[in-house]
Image (cartoon, rainbow, N blue to C red):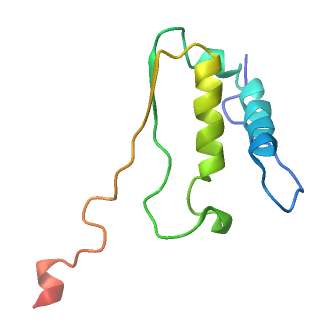
Amino acid sequence: MPASLAIAHTREKHRSIDGVEALVREALVHLGGMQAFVKAGQTVLLKPNQTVYYSAEEGCTTDPLVVGALIRLAREAGAGRIQVGLGGIVGAGLRSRKQEK
């Protein structure tokens, strides 16, 4: 049975497209490969964490290089359509009426 969680780690100081893709591919292998999640012709929705105002280097949001790698790997697995869904946290940055009074 494949793992339910996978982590790939690098000691590289600078990220590259190829290096990040290799790490994402390595992590997915432990989960059964992208083919375990994507079937030929399927529409795939990727929902990265982009809801806070921090850069990927700070570890709070999904690195855009990871999103790109996932898109390429989903395409390689036969995805028919790939969408990236972004959306802020509902009410983020808004004060409640109680706070305004």
Give the vertical position of 60 relative to 32 (above or below).
Answer: below
State the image quarter where residue 74 is shown. Answer: top right
Q: Nearer the viewer, residue 13 or 26?
A: 13
Q: Nearer the viewer, residue 51 or 71?
A: 71
Residue at 61% in and 40% down: 68
Residue 88: x %, y % from top left: 34, 57
Give the vertical position of 69 relative to 94 (above or below).
Answer: above
Furthest residue to the bottom?
101
Furthest residue to the front?
17
Which quadrant of the rendered structure holds the N terminus? top right
Residue 5: x %, y % from top left: 68, 36
Residue 60: x %, y % from top left: 58, 63
Q: Is residue 54 left or right of residue 17?
A: left
Residue 31: x %, y % from top left: 70, 25
Q: Is residue 65 left or right of residue 19?
A: left
Which quadrant of the rendered structure holds the C terminus? bottom left
Give the vertical position of 97 relative to 15 (above or below).
Answer: below
Q: Is residue 36 left or right of residue 20?
A: left
Residue at 21% in and 79% down: 95
Q: Is residue 46 left or right of residue 94?
A: right
Residue at 45% in and 66% down: 52
Residue at 77% in and 27% down: 30
Could you tell me how many numbered marks the image carries?
Answer: 0
